[in-house]
Amino acid sequence: MRLYKLTDAQGYTRNRTFWDIGVTHEVTGVAKLCTSTVIHAYTNPLLAALMNPAHANYQNPKCFVVEGEITVSDSTKVGCQKLTVIDTFELPQVTTNQRVAFGILSALKEHKGAECPMAWYYRGSTKILKEFTGLITK
């Protein structure tokens, strides 16, 4: 499956693991996110750009297109036990409004309906949500 892997500007992830086109990394063990038994990736580059500040927080990250089979997922990132880099990809630039819209949509996914503490804000944020939706469909 095609996935996306973020690194720092020099191509390294935590523990100084180097990534570049043609490189394959593999781990073993019972797959569990946020452990050494999986290699983290994203299902699309927009999600990678949006989640980078909360996950790795790379400054000027590189984005690699990788191939691998997902063994575990938490809806924000996936874990694989083997990834091979096949290409690079330019991360989309995400605006503040798009980040806010992503936060709103994420909260609404967890708290559906009028009981959502952010429902009042959501109803007034159609411009932001339209901008975010436009980025998704591009």
Image (cartoon, rainbow, N blue to C red):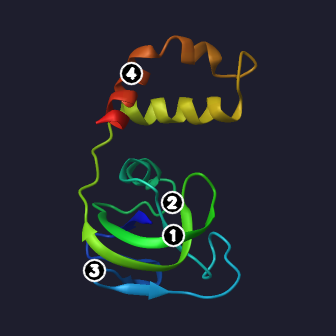
Badge 4 element: helix
Viewer-side label of 3, 2: 3
* Vertical relation: 124 (above or below) 9: above
Rendered-image quadrant of the N terminus: bottom left
Instruction: Measure how far apart labels 4 and 1 are at the Cα level.
Output: 30 Å
Q: Which residue was labeled with disc 4? A: 130
Q: Earlier in the sequence, mark 4 or mark 3?
A: 3
Label ID, residue 23: none
Badge 3 element: loop
Instruction: Measure how far apart labels 4 and 3 are at the Cα level.
Output: 36 Å
- Whether tag 3 and tag 2 are in contact, CB under 8 A, the answer is no
Q: Amino acid at mark 3?
A: Asp
Q: Earlier in the sequence, mark 3 or mark 1?
A: 3
Q: Which residue was labeled with disc 1? A: 40
Where, by quadrant of the figure, is residue 66 drawn?
bottom left
Q: Amino acid at mark 1?
A: His
Badge 2 element: loop
Where, by quadrant of the figure, is residue 132 drawn?
top left
Q: Amino acid at mark 4?
A: Lys
Instruction: Measure how far apart labels 3 and 1 are at the Cα level.
Output: 15 Å
Label ID, residue 20: 3
- Residue 7 visible to the viewer: no
Q: Earlier in the sequence, mark 2 or mark 4?
A: 2
Q: Which residue was labeled with disc 2? A: 55
Residue 93 in the image, given as x and y percentages of width and height:
27, 44
- Whether tag 2 and tag 1 are in contact, CB under 8 A, the answer is yes
> For the point 39% across and 67% down, which residue is it?
5
